[in-house]
Image: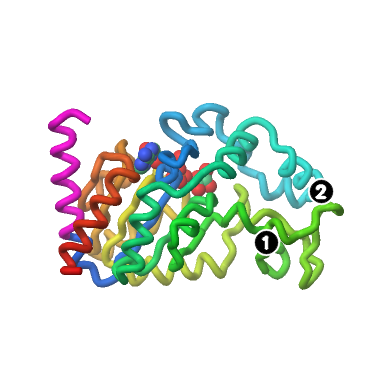
Amino acid sequence: MAEDAATRVSAGIERAATISARAQYLVALTGAGMSVESGIPPFRGPGGLWTKYGEPPMNGYQRFLADPAQAWRERLSPQGPMRELWETLHAAQPNPGHHALARLESAGILRCLITQNVDNLHRLAGSQAIAEIHGNYMLVRCIECSRRFAGDEIPLEALPPRCPHCQGILKNDSVFFGEPIPTDVLGRCFDAAEQCDCMIVAGTSATVYPAAQFPFDVRQRGGDVIEINPYATELTPIASVSVHGPAAVVLPELAMRIIQLRGM
Ligand code: APR
């Protein structure tokens, strides 16, 4: 990173830490860019899956409901972009950015982590106050009663697998395009976003709703938004601070400064 860019990033981190350290209810919102340094490509922008293969069909959920068995067969032997995504998901490990957010939570500073990522890396890094708004690929969920189960606990001899509780059809917990976001996790997201007076937004293009709405709402209520993204997004014009750097590099420095400023 050229000297002046590095200087700009450090100055941005300092401003972001000052604002975040005085927050009463700090919330983080993360997207695919959070896991780029873990080897998982983003969806949009440079190196994105949709950039490479084109946007997926927007009716994934309707196609699942039309033929759940066939959808499960495709899930168990994925092709093209979904194969690339599943393979990188299985190999990925949390990066220093994930660990930094887990540290802020264990220091009692970060109150909630809303993630659009299904990759389970925040949980692996130790985050517990977490709302996975687009689900978690390691889980399956009943489309009738919404109960979730560990994917490796469910027999797959008969497809589609059935819910042990109500015999409803099970699907991967990842939210498909066109699928309503489960009300339990959506409720947790709205609760956190409504109490939030400062939101750290890392690694998202801020283009998919309702997740993208949260930072705009925080700003509208007079709260602060800290954006961490190597590139400008729809959020950049309204952010209190935009730090143009990779999450795995910026977040550890930001977390350390926030903890120092909190006198911990
Ligand atoms: N650090 C931080 N941000 C990064 C990095 C990085 N190292 N590399 C890329 N980015 C940024 C990109 O500039 C982009 O703005 O991460 C963002 C990734 O944007 P998307 O690929 O659109 O991912 P996301 O915003 O999470 O997408 C939202 O869309 O396809 C659906 O369900 C999927 O949850 C996903 C949702």
Type of residue at label 2? Ala
Question: What residue is pinned by disc 1?
Answer: 141
Q: Quadrant of residue 148?
A: bottom right
Question: What residue is pinned by disc 2?
Answer: 69
Q: Nearer the viewer, residue 234 or 10?
A: 10
**Residue at the image position 44 percent from the left and 55 percent from the top:** 211
Type of residue at label 1? Arg
Identify the image quadrant of the C terminus: bottom left
- Disc 2 under 8 Å from ligand 1? The reply is no
Q: Nearer the viewer, residue 63 or 130?
A: 130
Q: Around disc 1, counting alpha carbons within 10 Å, would you say few (fewer than 14), some (14 to 19), or many (20 or more)? A: many
What number of labels is visible? 2
The span picked out in magenta is 1-18
Cα distance in 3D space between marks 1 and 2: 15 Å
The local secondary structure at tag 2 comes to helix
Q: Quadrant of residue 169?
A: bottom right
